[in-house]
Image: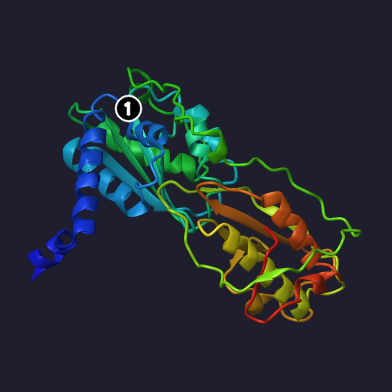
Amino acid sequence: MSENANLEVLSTRSGFNSAVRHIKKTMEIASRTGAVNIGDILFEMDDDELTSAKVGMLLRMLLVDKLGYKTASANLSAAVENVSVLAKEFNKWNGVDLVAAYYHPELGLLVANPKIAEELADFGDLRKRELVVIYAGLQGKETDENCQKAAELAIKLFEGSKLKPPSALTRGRYTAKKVSKPKKAAESKPVKTKIVKAKPGIKKAAAPVVKAAAPQVKPAAGNARMTPRYAVVVQNELFHNGNVEAWKRIIASYKAAHPDLEVYIYYENERILDINSLFKWGKVKHGSAIEFAVAGNEIKDVAKLQRYLAQGASHMFEAFLHGAVNSVLKLF
């Protein structure tokens, strides 16, 4: 029964083809891991099919089983707001190869070479109590006690400790090499957006509607990116039920136009899973800041989304309440 369960994925053509693609990708990556940091490889590949679950299997198979890397892990005791600055410290660790894995609560498993600031920046802000795992090894050479020590010290750096690595970890050939993502076609480039400050004089949004329901599609965790959090200041006297409904319809419209993207809402540094559960009458008042972020592979229309959310948090929220109850506004 156990064997049948493991092979069940191969019983369909789509499952079999998916398994073959995964095996080919694994072999391609395995052929390079003896000389190149696996975080660099994944960063350069930027492959949509390398989902969180598949990346986790790659790390276990290639780093632990094949190359014998040592590991250390911790659920962070405090949040880390600027993780990329750690790259300056890890960049000195030429005596060992390091790979960092962070279990992002929204994006899933993220992997980086911690010696490269650009790769670490993809982690965003590390959240308290979330899991970080460090892999330390010698890219095919037999590991030693210095590798285990390196993994444990690296975790301490992520936890905020100030320390000086022993000389055995700073002398060697495992230097960081600049890597870059493959260039994509111009039309598929993510759109860079600036924060748009909410203005009291924003005009009412038009309210044409379409009848299709907004799809609920999660981004591909293995290749997804997340924007910084953007603040929307509540301009209404209270963020009441009307504002809540306006935000729901704005977000539904955004997801209908961009089904592969996900919108996350935060208040007082906590993620809000159900807007109704927090934004009750009198809970969020004038001047409070509600934050949002967008995650996915091809992020678009963030500035427009912010403008609409700002209007939805003001006394002009009614512009978004027109149309049938289950219809979706065509805003994007």
Amino acid at circle 1: Val
User: Tag 1: Cα neighbours inside 10 Å, few (<14), some, or many (≥20)?
Assistant: many
Is residue 147 or residue 206 the one in the foreground?
206
* Position in image of residue 29 (x %, y %): 26, 34
In the depicted structure, whether residue 323 falls above or below residue 32? below
Is residue 192 or residue 150 the one in the foreground?
192
Outermost residue toward the right in this view? 201
Colouring rule applied to residues: rainbow
Residue 88 appears left or right of 232: left
Label 1: which secondary element: loop
Residue 137 appears left or right of 218: left
Q: Kindly tell me whether residue 76 is visible in this rendering.
A: yes
* Position in image of residue 214 (x %, y %): 56, 69
Q: Name the residue under label 1.
A: 96
* Position in image of residue 267 (x %, y %): 67, 64
In the depicted structure, whether residue 260 falls above or below residue 182? below
Residue at x-position 44% and y-position 25%: 179
* Position in image of residue 87 (x %, y %): 50, 31
Residue 172 appears left or right of 232: left
Q: Kindly tell me whether residue 285 is visible in this rendering.
A: no
Residue at x-position 75% and y-position 76%: 321
Residue at x-position 47% and y-position 39%: 157
In the depicted structure, whether residue 306 falls above or below residue 209? above
